[in-house]
Amino acid sequence: MKTPPFYICVMLLVFNAGIGTAQKKLVNGVWHAALTTATGKQIPFNFEVKDTLGKKQLAIINGSERFKVSDIETKDDSILIHMPLFDSEIKTRVEGNTLKGKWIKHLPQKDVAMDFFARPNEPVRFLDARTKPRYNIQGRWSAIFAGGETTVAEFKQQGGALTGTFLTTSGDYRYLEGVVAGDSLYLSCFDGGHAYLFTAKIEDGQAISNGKFYAGYSSISDWAAVKNDAAKLPDAYSLTALKPGIKKVDFTFADLNGKKVSLSNPQFKNKVVILQLMGSWCPNCMDETAYMVNFYKKYQTLGVEVVGLAYERSADFNLSKASLSLVQKRFNVPYPILITGYTTAKNEVIKSLPMMADFSAFPTTIIIDKQGTVRKIHTGFSGPGTGNYYTEFINEFEKLIDGLVAEK
């Protein structure tokens, strides 16, 4: 029996109503989005919407990185975008052809929110910065931030398009993207956990001045830079050490299932062990985790073990477990991640590992030989957004591990 046309129309109306305004307005393509700081400054970024297996999927664009977000809820004219890391979300409503709402970052004691908007079919990042560039700033720079922190800036420029990052002793600012317009520099990044905006004046091909660094809702710092092809950071293996006379570390912490794990466990006997001091809140730690997962797959059969020691913003086991489970799922981490029960303060790390003389930053990587002796401690992590720095680190690190594996 044929279904009458009237009923077909009713069924289609019901189906379309179920889709909702938000689902239909979340159109495929590249969007322009921005977060607004306390001073009214906008931190822009782009994202692309696609249909994947019948569902909307979003990819946040920062340079060559595409940060995939698949947990998207739509209802009526509302859209809720759950970030896969960093315990944050974007809550928006459809207003005309624009999404308006808040980016909400959940912290242990409070939530922090920033105004958010996005418009479809606008692939431009900095809408008001389209002037022809006066200078090309490609190359390496010595950059100094307020407080005297010295960093290394690495920029790549094609026409007015600019990408790059700032490297520090604790890691890098990951994938930054922007433009050189006239004599001005603009760079930004949003990864679901951190929102950055860099602006500055380019004096000539050799100096950058009047820089402002906006981080999150309210942080503002000054910065400046000079061209320096020889700029480099201190040796990352020289920044953290054990106390004099101590050569080994030990601990007992619980994994995500509550099982106690110690370096004295049989699985680590006569193995080269890598301790990854990390946290789910730390973007450089996430870059390191992505690398360590592939490293572990390559080196485990050669007698190498990796253990993550997690320091979270809360000492609560269940809250830590929830955040770290997202990390484990996101990167499909095959090695144990242990919940130390200590928070991110430097003195807390020393309490958890009292054999350490100092602690500089997350992530920190402790490299232990087959006899249980600490051979090297590496501070920070230069991720794939740093280009050659990342490649050089991997080559150096894996050469070190190859040597330890070969030892009898």
Image: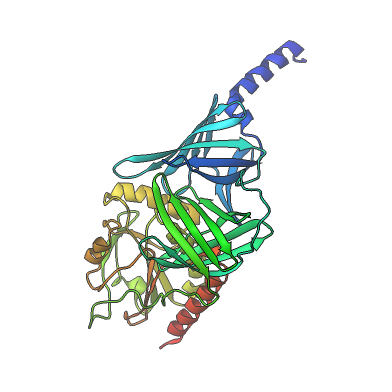
Q: Is residue 399 visible?
A: yes
Instruction: Give me the residue at 29% from left, 50% from top.
Output: 314
Q: Is residue 225 above or below residue 34?
A: below
Q: Position of residue 104 (x, y in %)?
A: 42, 39
Q: Quadrant of residue 133?
A: bottom right
Camera-nearest residue between 279 and 199: 199
User: For the C terminus, which image quadrant?
Assistant: bottom left
Query: In the orientation shown, which residue stands out farthest toward the bottom?
Result: 408
Q: How is the image coloured?
A: rainbow
Above/below status of 121 relative to 167: above
Where is residue 290 shown, x and y percent of the image? 50, 61
Q: Quadrant of residue 161?
A: bottom right
Residue at x 61% of width, y 47% of height:
125
Task: Please state if 96 lies on the left or on the right of 236 as rendered.
Answer: right
Looking at the image, residue 273 sits to the left or right of residue 173; the answer is left
Which residue does the image show at 33% across and 50% down from the upper left? 320
From the viewer's perspective, tell me whether residue 31 is left or right of residue 252: right
Q: Position of residue 114 (x, y in %)?
A: 44, 39
Regarding residue 4, the answer to whether it shows in the image is: no
Identity of the residue furthest to the front in this view = 203
User: In this figure, what is the number of numbered marks?
Assistant: 0
Name the quadrant of the N terminus.
Answer: top right
Q: Is residue 231 above or below residue 12?
A: below
Point 31% across, 40% down: residue: 110
**Residue nearer the viewer, 289 or 31:** 31
Where is residue 332 shown, x and y percent of the image? 49, 57
